[in-house]
Amino acid sequence: MEIGLITLAVILATLLGWLLKQSFNTQPWIAEQVSATAHHGPLGGSSNTRLIALMALMAVVTSFFALILSAYALRMELGDWVPMTEPQLLWTNTVMLIFASLALQWTRNGAVKGQASRLKPGLIATGVLTAGFIIGQLIAWQQLQAGGQLITNNPSNAFFYFLTGAHAVHIIGGMYVWARATARVMLGTAEGGTIRRSIELCTIYWHFLLLVWLILFGLLLST
Amino acid sequence: MPLAVVLILLVVGSLLFHLLSPWTFTELASNWGMVDFTVDVTLYVTGFVFVVVNLFMAYCVIKFRYRKGARATYEPENKKLETWLTGLTAVGVAAMLTPGLFVWAKFVDVPEEAHVVEAIGQQWHWTFRMPGADGKLGEVDAERISNDNPFGMDPDDPNGQDDILVYNPEVHVPIDKPVKFLLRSKDVLHDFAVAQFRVKMDLVPGMNTFLWLTPTQEGRFEILCEELCGIGHHTMRGAVVVDSAGDYDTWLANQPTYSALNAKPAGNAGIGAAQYAICASCHGQQGEGNVAMNAPKIAGQSSWYLKRQIMNYKKGLRGTNPADTFGQQMTGMVAMLADEQAVDNVVAHIRTFPDNPVEQTSQGGNPMAGAKQYSVCAYCHGKDGMGVQALNAPRVAGMSDWYLERQLRYFRDEVRGSHLQDYYGFQMGLMGQSLYDEQAMKDLIAYINTL
Amino acid sequence: MSYVAIADRDHEQEHHDPQTFLTKYIWSQDHKVIAVQYGITAIFVGLIALGLSAMMRLQLGFPNQFSFINPENYYQFITMHGMIMVIYLLTALFLGGFGNYLIPLQCGSRDMVFPYLNMLSYWVYLLSVIILIISFFVPGGSTGAGWTLYPPQAIMQGTPGTDWGILLMLASLAVFIVAFTMGGLNYVTTVLQARCQGMTLMRMPLSVWGIFIATILGLLAFPALLVSAIMMLFDKTLMTSFFMPAISSMGVDPGYTGGSPILFQHLFWFFGHPEVYIVALPAFGIVSDLLSTHARKNIFGYRMMVWAIVAIGGLSFIVWAHHMYVSGMNPYFGFFFATTTLIIAVPTAIKVYNWVLTLWQGNIHLRVPMLFAIGFIFTFIHGGLTGLFLGNVTIDLPLSDTYFVVAHFHMVMGVSPVLVVFGAIYHWWPKITGKMYNETLGKWHFWMTFLGTYAIYLPMHYLGFAGVPRRYFAMGNTEFLPDSAQDLNAAITISALFVALTQILFFVNMIWSLWKGPKSDPNPWDATTLEWQTPDHPPKHGNWGHELPVVHRWAYDYSVPGYEEDFIPQNVPADKAPAGRDHGEDH
């Protein structure tokens, strides 16, 4: 459980430090005159709302994967674990996911700078590369199945399918948001600010899932 | 006001309930008096807090109840008071935790000289194994477990040959000697708990767990399974009998070793045929049963079950209750079988009989309703009613229905299964007692007749 | 539109005033309506679970007298009772119900920040409830594995409901977790982002604090349940061996190898222990507000209360294995977990002291919500103290898996939060409905529930001392138990049935109030928090009319010296009422 604990400790410590900073020296019973136009909240303007929600979501997803990895580490110590050889295709997939992240970052930079011409090609490239990753993962599964590496063979196989599957589900969830942003760009149904923020959030999420994948992949390779 | 009075009454009432309650820890029968000591310390500390805080609250409710014109004091916080309270609480917590940790340190540290008893759990009974003269237990493996090898012993392991195997849920240990119970489960989680010993531990399939204790009182102490293990959880009972050194040696000498069990000759149907003659007068030449003689069909019944019941009659575990007239007759008859070998021979002969359909006598039952009743029975006796040896559940389908009905009634009324050592009868009693209703019983029999 | 839309907040879903019955009460995105939907659904499944507990009490009090109870459905009853009460009633009611209602109103916002997601959260929750209810009717019935669903037993043949029941249970849990995550992200973001001007974190009412921290715990802990549920589904359907070791079940080898049942228990309790505080923290927060309001006194030691909530929340992640002292895990863990568990008693005790000290020198109105709040303190002290027995690894040896455990967690997690739930419903009922309830009927309801539940659970501890194991369908003849234990069980059953029946009073009161109850004052308790200051009563969609409130003070300005009235609402400007005084170290 160490992995889960450490991850949670980091999340909680961040939260705790922030809370203490808010509360330690205040004397809440003292009233003060507040003007109706005062600065909104401690975390800045309300345009951060979606970012905050995304950060909370990423904390949940981190907890989810950290717990699977905790289970992975505990299960690995039991006698019957046989390390699995990962299909070489995963390297290709990883490269595709990295490029998907890069493409999205490029698109985002364009959106921030107001270069609308980058949006369409950037989003499409992201979509193609990400879909390529998912399809690549499916092909990797098929290769394993064909090679007799079934989910029941060994717990290492079971964890491989579970981890890659869970990661892919999260990517597909991201693809839904990507699809909405792309549709808006194509149809021109939303104003630039909305699209920009949407792309910014997608970019953070993509980088996050890339990071999750790199950790998972590294762990799968090393064990 | 009534609230304050009630709070005070509840505090006083709780204390009185505690002091007067006849329901408290059973008399201690092991070395774990320190557990009781830790409980006592915790009771004093928590009892003190319970009384003081609640009485203070009751006082506040009276003293500061709403009065017109009264006004509450304004006091956001009081650091000094809060610090004191925190400090005192920490002291109280430390007072409870410290003995706890010391006792636990003793519990996880098994004395060198402790002798080993392996307690094996399965749905829903206990068995035991002890190392023989070599002091070592043989290898076991869940994949080797079968009806012929219920312990999953490795036949090629020399350490296992002299292991002592106790295939019933009662084990003996000598008094005043530390004993380490090695715990192993064949199927699901169980828990080895003896109230008088104070300690308990789960049995986990796939690994070994342990607990240790030194029994300090002679007597028979019940083992209860205390980790939910399926529908028969509450019937999973056993016993640890604490003996004087002499009695223990006598008991131990009577327990078979693995190699002795393997060497035992199988029953000889030929010899059994001669001995069967006396049985035939009631049960029929082919074991087909005879309702007029109150003799059930025995052809087709599982051999292990027949043997166990004959042995139970012989040992006086069954057929001793005055209400069981026919069982008493049977007790007289089985005395003709001199020893266990003779029983094996007869059972081997019975096994050769053809399993012909039996005449169905039960009336007035609704098999559709009975099917619902049987869903409970099916867990042990099988969906087809053919019995499952691993669960000590005999065949019920295709046997004499009038006999089945009578036995169900006996189980319900504790005529059968009430002897402490009729372990499996006791289990059936606990399950059968939920079938209190006459019509439900008839429905059930009607359903079993359709199987 | 009755107010300026929050367009600057980048909402894709604009707030529209409700038009039809359907959009107003069914497909509503108004947090108040969603709160009521959550509440009604949770109470409905809670009543089913109450019925199940009545059935199991009948068997325990009067064994084998009722032909509709057999070992099979008995184990199904206890399992579904536990699961429904813990997850589908208490979690959903405190966070989905009270969280939804109170966060926007007490923080001074118009709604949750993602109203559409909020609505979706409720409908997904309803789906999980429907799946749960379907599991009662599938072949083999619902699962009977105990609410902890420990493998291997939960998916092996010897347990009721291993064909369909367990699959639907796990599926329902997964769906519930999705619903919870949708709601939870919303609650956290709303608290962080949508508070009105002046509402600093340290001015938030403790209700919001409790719900906020509980939601964070839920967001981080529920994934553990999701992970274990998915892995168990794999073990059951795909024959993987995450949790399943090589076993011989009923004489048959089912084909598993090498898994670890203890791994499941670690994951389960990693969720399960924070879950206790997911239920307890909102109750802590709400009860603080009830006590302060009805005692006309500021909550004593507000900052300490906040830190205690945060500390309990943090510590709750490192105590989980105290549920596993006798599970066969590495026994050396016992030292660590016993220590952390007893440490958590300190912030919890501080909360209790501060509640009681809030009553000290107050001006206590013993109205119905206050009765429930004080009843809560009593039962929570009792339940908290018995927790010190079980948290101590040594005492767990004789007491774990006995009725002592059942009595303890029902006192601390059943009775106490439910008393708060009732107190809170009575307290906010006028705000939710605009009607008053009948005070006398409410008091009767309190007395019967409070005394009745204590009569159930105090004696039950002593069954545990005597060694009666939990989850036993019948004791049979057990030598070490006195025969009087059965009489005690019968008495407990009678109390339980009594308490169950008296809940009718509550529903009668509420229905009467809706139908014929007098109109309530907009702020009947003279409370300071924002929900009582809404321009409309009950508040309309959007909560605040044209202008959002501005907060100038904390939520506990009761009986402030130098001000005529004994309460100053949070939105009263500092120059119109005393600004509090410096309250230094040296008081």
Image (spheres, coloured by chain):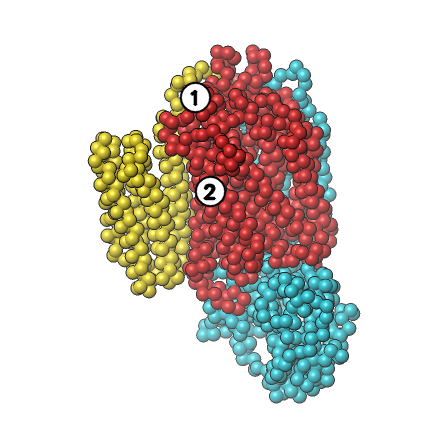
Chain colours: A yellow, B cyan, C red
Instruction: Note whether B449 is above or below B9 in the view shown.
Output: below
Residue A16's x, y, as percent? 42, 32
Residue C341's x, y, as percent? 51, 41
> Can residue C280 be seen by looking at this rendering?
no
The residue identified by callout 2 is: C179
Task: Characterize the local packing of mark 1: few (<14), some (14-19) or many (20 or more) Cα atoms within 10 angstroms.
Answer: many
User: Is residue B145 or residue B402 the one in the foreground?
Assistant: B402
Instruction: Note whether C43 is above or below B27 in the view shown.
Output: above
SS for callout 2? helix
What chain letter is assigned to the residue under label 2?
A: C
Task: Characterize the local packing of mark 2: few (<14), some (14-19) or many (20 or more) Cα atoms within 10 angstroms.
Answer: many
SS for callout 1? loop
Give the amino acid at mark 2: Ala
Q: Residue at x 52, y 40 (%)?
A: C92
> Can residue C493 be seen by looking at this rendering?
yes
The residue identified by callout 1 is: C197
Q: Residue at x 56, y 69 (%)?
A: B390
- Which is more N-terminal, label 1 or label 2? 2
Horizontal placement of C518 versus C264: left or right?
right
The answer for how far apart the CA atoms under marks 2 and 1 are is 30 Å
